[in-house]
Image (cartoon, rainbow, N blue to C red):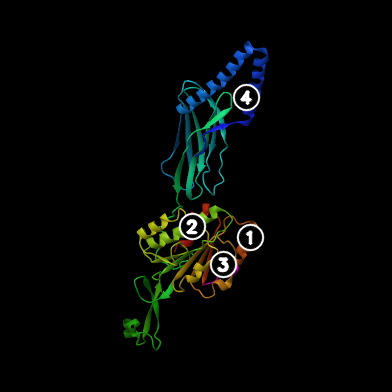
Amino acid sequence: MKWPFRLHPEMVILFAVGTILLHLSALYFGGAYIRLVVFWYLLYLLDFVLLIFNCVNLRYSQDFTSGHFSKDEEITYILRINGSGLVPVPSIKLKFTRIHLKDKQKFPSESFSLPAGQTKEFNRNIYTGLRGVYTMGLEELSLKGFTGLISINLPIWSRTFYIYPRLLEFKESLGRHSATGGRGRSQAGSHGEYHTFSGLREYREGEEVRKISWPRFMQTGVPYIRTFDSIGGSMIHICLDRRNPARSPECEDTVLEATLALIHTTVFSGQKVMVHGFPGGDGLAIEEMKDFRQLYKTTLHLEFDLKGFSDLQKVPGEGSLYVISGMPDLALLSEKMWSSRTSVHLIAVTEGMVTGERAKAKLLMNELKNDELEISEIRSGKSLPEDMKCIISS
């Protein structure tokens, strides 16, 4: 248990010197100096009693201006100190706790006196720019007497709130789709629930007879095969790269929010989604909104702590694949990384990159783009809503 009383060395020295001098004076001169020694001790005793009295009567409360907390908001933390006693508090010192483990916001210490029966209020604005747990409160609340010899640390506590990633919803911007980079490209497929009629072509020996258009055969005497375009009937794979970008925690949040936006929009459109890169397994099937909500709750404390990107190798080759990465290096912009895959869309989050590094990444992206690989760049979480809407619109 931490001892609440603390002696201040500079005042201890002053007290000791004063005591010795007064005792010597009383010893050699007597009279008034004896009464001065008594007064000296009574002064410090009275100061200690008043300090205890102020500690008993001091009250403080903490609150926030909002009961609902969202990302990218400014919330005001309010601290009220009330001296309800009959004597003033000569010295109060406040130290505020850290707000967020990855946040650079810091508040300076405060020292002040408080008149008897009055309340002092402190307001501190907190910017919720990162997901995670925010802790706001007091690290230290100490009272000092008039003499400054002793201070007492009072019991303290903090207030916490939780900030989840933003959830961007594009419910009207996406139908059943393949990974097309927003260009509406369809893929050939067989007739089924999510396929539309495309046209006719001549029958080739060995093809299924059931696909022949018999009305056209009756008209021309030549067999034609009906063809269809796929608009997303196959499984969509979404892979989160959880390697640490090491540039900024904001970049991690942008990567995660882009991933959640894709998963949510795809599930809302009625397609099956297999997500990769999240803790708890090689692949997690998300078919309904309740599955998505369970996944979303796990993202509060999700860490970007993977050393390598082995999850990409575990993704099956069939179906459309989205890869969302904070680009900790430029390995994903290597052609051999995608040589064995088709229908891939790489979403590269370059937030926090220095100018030279971003220019090099941009050059590699332009060289790598082809019919089988789409690459989109997201430069900042601030532009994410518009960038993502462009990426996933069909």
Amino acid under disc 3: Leu
Q: Which residue is drawn at 45% across and 58% down?
A: 260
Tell me which numbered mark, 1 or 2, is placed earlier along the sequence: 2
| Lateral position of residue 131 relative to residue 13, left or right | left
Q: Which residue is drawn at 43% across and 61% down?
A: 263
Rounded to the nearest angstrom, the CA distance separating label 4 from label 1 is 63 Å
The residue singled out by tag 1 in the image is 357
Question: Do we see residue 192 in this rendering?
Answer: yes
Q: Do the residues labelled 1 and 3 touch (CB within 8 Å)?
A: no
Q: Please tell me how crowded label 4 is: few (under 14), some (14-19), or many (20+) other residues with Cα within 10 Å.
A: some
Q: Nearer the viewer, residue 143 or 130?
A: 143
Amino acid under disc 1: Glu
Q: Residue 15 carries which label?
A: 4
Residues drawn in magenta: 365-371
Quadrant in the picture for the C terminus: bottom left
Q: Is residue 84 magenta?
A: no
- Vertically, is 164 above or below 53? below
The residue singled out by tag 3 in the image is 332
Rounded to the nearest angstrom, the CA distance separating label 1 from label 3 is 14 Å
The residue singled out by tag 2 in the image is 256
Rounded to the nearest angstrom, the CA distance separating label 4 from label 2 is 60 Å
Residue 22: x, y in percent? Answer: 65, 18
